[in-house]
Amino acid sequence: MIFMTTRTHFTCLLLFLLIAGTVIAGCTNTGTQAGTAVQNRTTTTQAALAGEEQPLKFGELWLITGFDPMNSGVFITEKAIVTEALIGADQDFKLIPNLATTWRRTSPVTWEIALRENVSFHNGQPMTASEVKFSLDRAARLNAQNRQFMDYDSSRVIDAHTIEITTSKPNPILPEALHYPNMAIIHPDSLDAAGNFTTPIGTGPMVFDSFDQQTRTFTVKRNPHWWGGPVQLPGMVMTGIPDSNARALAIEKGEVDFTVDVPMNEVQRLNDLPGVTVDTYLTPRVYRMVVNFQRPALQDKRVRQAISLAINRDDIVDHVLYNVGAPARGLYIPSMAWFNTSMQALPYDPEKAKALLAEAGYRDTNGDGIVEKDGRPFTIDLVSAQERPGLPPMSEAIGQYLKEIGIDARVEIMASAASTDRQKAMNYDLLMVPANIAMIPDPGYIIDTWFRTDGYANSGKYSNPTLDARIDDAKQTDDLKERYAKFNKIEADIYDEMISIPLADYGVTIAHKDTVTGYRFDPTAHDLRMDANMTLTG
C-alpha cells in the first residue's frame, strides 16, 4: 500500500556526507573483537567485481554490531537473509511453510514439526532434525526472551526430518513463535571448538562472505544451492547508516542502491530525482508513548487520558509525518485478522484535557501557563531516540501540545543506546518508541510482553494482577475466534485506561535506484525483509 508523499527542501551536514562516504567505501577484514564473531576471508572489493555482477549496496538503518541469530535474528535472518526460521508468514500474517512443512499439536505441551527435505546448509551439509534441535536449544538457553516466546522446555529428534518440541506450559501459538527471526536454524559448525559463535552458516538465499570490524560492513553472496530455487540477487554489501539524512544523501549520491526510512519530508523530493523511487508501506509498527508508572502523577488515569486528548493525531500524520503512516486506532493496524474494528480514532480535545487535569487537582494558580499541584508545577520528561526519522519531530510536536494544556514537557532526543539506558533506569516520564507489533503474528505477542507484570518489554512497570490473569486466559485459548475476542476486550480496556498512549501507525519508506526491481515488501518483518529475487541492472 503506497501513500501520498510531500516535497520539501533538503539539508544535510557535511559530517553526514563524510560518514556515509566512509562507511560505504570498500571493506577489509580485521581480527576478531571480544564478543563479535568474524570469519576471516578474502573480501570481495568493487575492483575485483569489475566485469562481473555487482552486489546490491544496502544502507542499513542500524550499525551492524552482531549477527548471531539467537539475538541478532532481525539482521541476519531478515536483512542479510543468511539464516531462516522454520515457519513463514504471508502478507495477511497467516503462517506458511518454510524450513518446516507441517506442524501439529500432539498434546497440550508437545508439537510435532515435519522438516523440509533436500535442504542444505551453506557448508554443504544436509539440514536434519539434529541441527534444528541444536539451534532451538541454543536460542532458548542463551536468550530468555526466546525461551519466553516459545515457552520452550526441550525437544527431541524423532527421525531425520521430524522433531518434537515440548513446551513448559500449553502454548497454542508455538508455531507463530517459530516465525520469530531469533529462532533461525544454523549448523553447529557456526561455533568454534570452544562453543563461541564465529560464522553464520545457515540455509538462506545468501551466504556469509565477510565482515569488516572497522567499517562494520557486512557482505553476502548468492547461494547457488538454495532450496527455494534460483536466486536473482548476486549479493549485498551492507553498511549501517544510523542517520536518516545521511541515508537520504547516500541514495541521492548513488552511494547505495537501496535504503530504508529516509526523512518523511524528503520522500517526494527523492522520488522526483531521476533514477530514484521511494515507496511507502504501512507496516505493523506503532508509535506510542510508554508511561512510567513509578511516577505518581502518571498513576492517575485522568492525567494519562488528558495527555492523550491533548494530541492531535491527524495533524501529526498530515504535517509531521507527511502522510507516511496513519492515526492509530488502538494497538494494531487494520490489515491484521485480529484488528478490533470497534476501536475508534483517539479524539483531540484540549478543553476536555484541561478539565481532566483540573479534576485531578492541577491548576494554573500563578498565570504562567503551567498547571501546579501542591505548589509544584507539572513537569514531564519526554524522552525519544533519534534514529527513526519520525520520532524527533513527533516528540517536539507532542511537547508543544502538552504545553498548550499546561504541562511543561521537557523533550529530550538522544541516540537509541542512551534512550535505552534511560528506559532501563526508569529515568523518564514518557518514552517515545516505534514498537513492532507482529514479529510473532498473534495479538498476544505485544499484550503479554508490554502489559503483563513480568512481561519482558513492560518498560513502564505497569502491574495489574487481574489483567495478568486475563492475559494468561487469552493466551491459553486455542479457538482463534474466541482468542481474538478475548484479546480485543483486553486491548479495549488498555485503550480506555491509557496504560500506553498510541499515536500513529508506522509508515516505512523504501528508497531504491530504478535499477533495482522486483522488491516485495514483507509486512511481518521487523523493519523490512530483503528479497533475494530482486534484480539489479546497470
Image (spheres, helix red, strand yellow):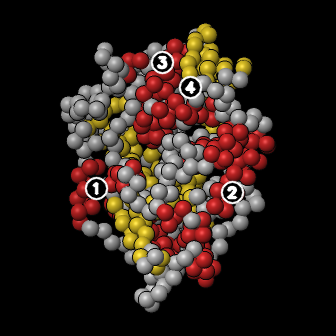
Report crowding for label 1: few under 14, some 14 to 19, many 20 or more residues within 10 A (C-alpha): many
Residue to which mark 2 is pinned: 493
Q: Which mark sits nearer the N-terminus, 1 or 4?
A: 1
Q: Which residue position is annotated with label 3?
A: 134
> Label 2: few (<14), some or many (≥20) within 10 Å?
few
Which label was assigned to residue 494?
A: none
Q: Secondary structure at mark 3?
A: helix
Q: CA separation, marks 3 and 2?
A: 41 Å
Rendered view: 82 above or below 305: above
Residue 345 against residue 283 in the figure, above or below: below
Query: Judging from the image, what secondary structure is the residue with disc 4 in?
Result: strand
Residue named by callout 1? 20
Quadrant of the snapshot with the N terminus: bottom right
Residue 393 visible in this rendered orientation of the protein: no
For the view shown, which residue lies furthest in the left direction? 31
Q: Is residue 134 visible?
A: yes
Instruction: Tell me the CA gap for discs 2 and 4.
Output: 30 Å
Mark-to-mark CA distance, 1 and 4: 42 Å
Tell me which label, 2 or 4, sits earlier in the chain: 4
